[in-house]
Amino acid sequence: MSAVKPFITLGIESSCDETGIGLYHSEKGLIGHQLFSQVDIHSEYGGVVPELASRDHIQRTLPLIKSVLADAETTLTDISAIAYTAGPGLAGALLVGSAVAKSLAWSLKIPSLGVHHMEGHLLAPLLEEKVPDFPFVALLVSGGHTMLIDVEAIGKYKILGESLDDAVGEAFDKTAKILGLGYPGGPALAQLAKQGDADVFKFPRPMTDRPGLDFSFSGLKTFARNTFSKNPEKKADIAKAFEVAATSTLMIKCRRALEQTRRTTLVVAGGVSANLSLRQELDAMGVKQGVQVFYPRQEFCTDNGAMIALAGHFRLSQGQKTAGGEIAIQPRWSLEDLEAV
Ligand code: KG4
Ligand code: ZN
């Protein structure tokens, strides 16, 4: 009796400032993943420098693939398919992942597939042991996006609301910069907020006093700037007030989206889903509303290769057709334009 050969998908993430590699096995699940973060390269500039990001991805991608394969006691010839982030993201950075994926796939004579970065985030909670069932509402909160999505199945997405200006992660980063914290600011601001008193300042909850599911976070950052210029000694209280306002705004909109769609499952993903106050707030709402809330583990909230390998695995195993060998990226790409599988 011959066993069916397992299907192993290699995932490559290079849309921004982290090189991430993941290896997803059709029977064993995730069998390897590694990340190289470029934080040290960009921190002296206070934000991501696209050209430096691309150059570093070029240097990191192949060694990282080799290292993940070795750790998983796997070789290149065991790989069945390659998934890479095709967009949205920085064009130069995406080109690196795409070029590596396409040439490696060509030389190994295996299929390759461009994956949507935000679909990767959205599916990341499915890497955990206890997974959400479809359909669900997803809150995607990253440095570039803030979106509420009605998810019927993989590839069947309806955007219910999104940010009209800054993404929530961007608002965390900009507020952190105003307070003189490092880059990336989100985790630093959350750290400082732990020492803050929530009763000193009250920040607004933007766009919660009118119907709808869109967001606006740029006003919060301005509010933080004005409060800081009058109270430069109250950094921790400002960080706390900002965090409370941002996270309760997200919670209010999630509750509204769940009521509107009558879904009883909420999936939260993207860099800001690592935020513990946000998780507390959403968990409390979930208990009150009878809604189950799912998150990725901390390390898979921010960018990583595991989520790209997983998204590629799902799509390929459900019969998605793959394209040819041309290097293909889509720096601007709406989730609603994805194919259902
Ligand atoms: O998903 P991600 O790694 O990259 C993008 O696709 O944008 O998200 C990065 C964002 C940054 O804005 C970062 O400051 C924010 O996620 N972030 C956090 C936390 N950890 C990361 N924001 C608030 N609290 C955190 N603990
Ligand atoms: Zn991301």
Image (tube, helix red, strand yellow):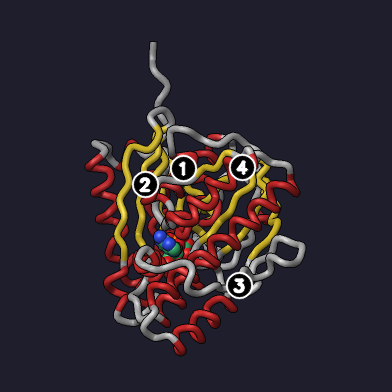
- Foreground tag (4 vs 1): 4
Quadrant of residue 30 within the rendered picture: top left
As rendered, which of 265 and 75 lies closer to the eye?
Answer: 265
The residue to which callout 4 is attached is: 288
Q: Which callout, 2 or 3, points at the residue further toward the start of the chain?
A: 2
Query: What's the amino acid at mark 3?
Result: Pro
Q: CA distance from mark 4 to mark 1?
A: 32 Å
| Element class at badge 1 | helix
CB under 8 Å between discs 1 and 2: yes
The answer to whether residue 32 is above or below residue 50 is: above
Q: CA distance from mark 2 to mark 3?
A: 40 Å
Query: What's the amino acid at mark 2?
Result: Gly
The residue to which callout 1 is attached is: 310
| Element class at badge 2 | strand
| Element class at badge 3 | loop
Quadrant of residue 69 within the rendered picture: top left
The furthest residue to the bottom: 229
Q: Which callout, 1 or 2, points at the residue further toward the start of the chain?
A: 2
Q: CA distance from mark 1 to mark 2?
A: 8 Å
The answer to whether residue 1 is above or below residue 150 is: above
Query: What's the amino acid at mark 1?
Result: Leu
Q: Which callout, 3 or 1, points at the residue further toward the start of the chain?
A: 3
Residue 274 on image: x %, y %: 43, 55
207 left or right of 310 in image? right
The furthest residue to the front: 199
Q: Residues within 10 Å of mark 3 (few under 14, many from 20)?
A: some
Q: Which callout, 4 or 3, points at the residue further toward the start of the chain?
A: 3
Q: Residues within 10 Å of mark 2 (few under 14, many from 20)?
A: many
Query: What's the amino acid at mark 4?
Result: Lys
